[in-house]
């Protein structure tokens, strides 16, 4: 886990960032820099089995591994004595949802980008059945994610960067996949457990990875005092890495300012 302190004249709060599956903190350097400029400290680490972590890559024993990690980051952020904001992208968004369902934490507001509440291209029924068997007898067996190249963003800069990044996880274990699907099911069916905290969902309109209709359905079901849904037409999954990322960041920044 790392912290990036803002040097702005007025510090408005601390943002905890949670990355998506396969990626890690360095893919958020631009966002962190923008948040620092806007007056927000940032706290971020690599989730278990991802990026620079030393444990088995692409594997977790349980989704609780993520929940406990995020809880620790939030309390580190709370140590600044400022409003704490929680941001999660894709699987990180799902992990934020599940963490808030299970843990009572000092969070002022939440922002999610393309949260993983369903997959556009889930495994075939045969592979799904096989994963159930392997999860019992060989949970650490790994398989390629097989995400099409360039499906996350239209940004050539990010695509070129990712091509040479050996820290990106491209294979995941059977247990990781089963825990992901269970977390999605739990988040959707247990939506009433999501706390009454201000929420912003920023969803890619042309998402090739996460099923945006599942995101809409979950968002429509939750009953919050304050919630906002913003869909960005034509943008791919990683809205804050798209060529239009300045527009997306401005939307996020305005939301944070409103609650600072």
Image (cartoon, helix red, strand yellow):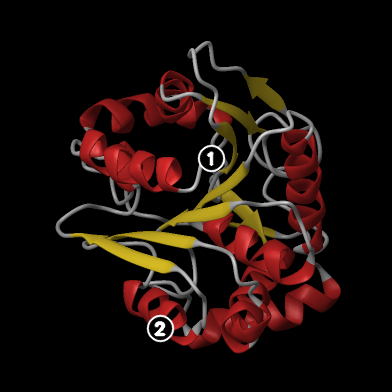
The secondary element bearing badge 1 is classed as loop
Q: Nearer the viewer, residue 122 or 25?
A: 25
Q: Which mark is residue 100?
A: none
Instruction: Report whether 11 appears left or right of 163.
Output: right
Residue 157 in percent (x, y) is at 26, 25
Residue in the picture at 38% in, 72% down: 121
In the displayed structure, would residue 152 be above or below residue 63? Answer: above
Is residue 248 visible to the viewer in this orientation of the structure?
A: yes
Q: Which mark is residue 23?
A: 1
Residue 194, image quadrant: bottom right
Q: Which of 158 and 17 is in front in this view?
A: 17
> Which is more N-terminal, label 1 or label 2?
1
Residue in the picture at 32% in, 30% down: 158
Instruction: Report whether 58 appears left or right of 118.
Output: right
Residue in the picture at 46% in, 80% down: 218
The secondary element bearing badge 2 is classed as helix
Residue 99, image quadrant: bottom right
Q: Which of 114 and 127 is in front in this view?
A: 114
Quadrant where the N terminus lies?
Answer: top right
Residue to which mark 2 is pinned = 220
């Amino acid at each position: 886990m790392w912290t990036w302190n803002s040097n702005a004249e007025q510090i408005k709060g601390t943002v905890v960032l949670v990355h998506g599956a396969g990626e890690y903190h360095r893919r958020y350097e631009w966002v962190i820099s923008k948040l620092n400029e806007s007056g927000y400290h940032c706290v971020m680490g690599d989730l278990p089995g991802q990026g620079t972590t030393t444990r088995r890559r692409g594997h977790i024993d349980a989704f609780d591994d993520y929940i406990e990690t995020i809880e620790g980051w939030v309390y580190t952020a709370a140590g600044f004595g400022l409003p704490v904001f929680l941001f999660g992208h894709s699987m990180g968004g799902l992990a934020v949802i599940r963490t808030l369902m299970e843990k009572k934490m000092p969070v002022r507001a939440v922002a999610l980008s393309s949260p993983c509440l369903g997959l556009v291209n889930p495994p075939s029924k045969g592979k799904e059945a096989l994963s159930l068997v392997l999860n019992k007898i060989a949970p650490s067996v790994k398989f390629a994610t097989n995400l099409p190249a360039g499906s996350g963003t239209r940004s050539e800069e990010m695509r070129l960067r990712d091509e040479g990044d050996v820290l990106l996880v491209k294979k995941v274990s059977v247990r990781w996949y089963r825990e992901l699907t269970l977390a999605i099911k739990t988040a959707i069916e247990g939506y009433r457990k999501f706390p009454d905290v201000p929420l912003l969902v920023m969803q890619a309109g042309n998402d090739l990875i996460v099923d945006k209709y599942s995101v809409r359905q979950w968002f429509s079901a939750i009953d919050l005092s304050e919630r906002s849904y913003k869909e960005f037409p034509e943008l791919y999954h990683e809205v804050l890495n798209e060529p239009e990322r300045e527009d997306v960041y401005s939307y996020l920044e305005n939301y944070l300012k409103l609650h600072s």
